[in-house]
Image (cartoon, rainbow, N blue to C red):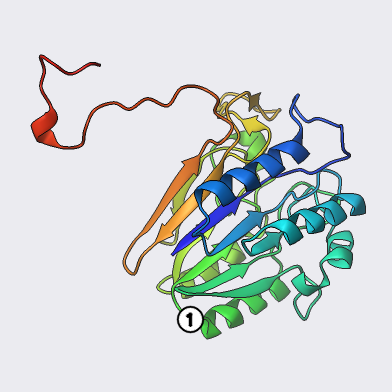
Amino acid sequence: MKLLQLTDIHLTKPGDTIAGRDPNENFRKALRHAITHHPDAEAIFITGDLSDWGDKDDYLRLKAEIAECPLPIHLCIGNHDERDVFLAVFPEGADENGFAQTVVPLTEGTAILLDTWGPDTHAGFYCSKRQDWLDRELSNATAPVFLFMHHNPVPIGIAPMDKIMLRDADGFGKVVSRHAAKIRHIFHGHCHLPLAGSLHGVPFSAPRGTNHAGWPDFANEGNLAGSDLPESYAVVLAEETSTMIHMIEYGYEGTVRQEGSPDYADWDRLTMVR
């Protein structure tokens, strides 16, 4: 089973840029790249910051873009979004409590999309209502389960980023711990960094994002750091006993070289070009 994860697309008013990049064009470029190179993907999951300012026009344009995509696309919201505005455009994304949470059956298991949004803050939240909902859905879900969310559920060791991580991490972690045997992987965004780790034995990962890139400045105590690294998305290859994740830097414009053969018999020190 192949899944694709895009994150932090930050759609904004046409013509506006973020860090000198056009997030609308970079999102379209990501979709074109994904459709061209991964038409066999089962679905695309976008893990939040769909809009940069939570404007309704951004969600309307996103809905139009999705309608043209031949692959199913499923959406999480992030701190830059506005839940009420998002659900006004995508009402099918709401759970029974009014949170933007959904369950998606997969050919191999289940995807659960989580709402970590909170008002007037860049930090994430996962309150007791949301925890109860997730606990129930995990109990009912067919394994393996793949969780998709925006905020990082553990500290990444960079002070300004950790100030805006998931605030209800302990409660969320307890739910994950109870169902750890069933959860295959957690996918998040928010940090604009390629990340990997584990929570109660459950692996998690994040790609960089489809527009502006972060930088792991461990000495910076106050400000988030940015860079000009290429835009990216993730390709997820899931089999019965394993999960492999690639970060695809579709924004890279340099040369891709063919460097030798994987066949050991072809490795000749005198004739190989390095």
Instruction: Report crowding for label 1: few under 14, some 14 to 19, many 20 or more residues within 10 A (C-alpha).
Output: some
Q: Is residue 247 visible?
A: yes
Viewport quadrant of the C terminus: top left
As drawn, is 179 to the left or to the right of 100? left
The residue positioned 81% from the left and 56% from the top of the image is: 64
- The image shows residue 59 at horizontal and vertical percentages of 84, 55
Up the image or down, 135 lies above or below 221; here it is below
As drawn, is 184 to the left or to the right of 264? right
Tally of marks: 1
Extreme residue in the bottom direction? 140
For badge 1, the amino acid type reads Thr
Viewport quadrant of the N terminus: bottom left
Q: Is residue 173 visible?
A: no
Residue 162: image quadrant is top right
Up the image or down, 134 lies above or below 113; here it is below
The residue positioned 91% from the left and 51% from the top of the image is: 57
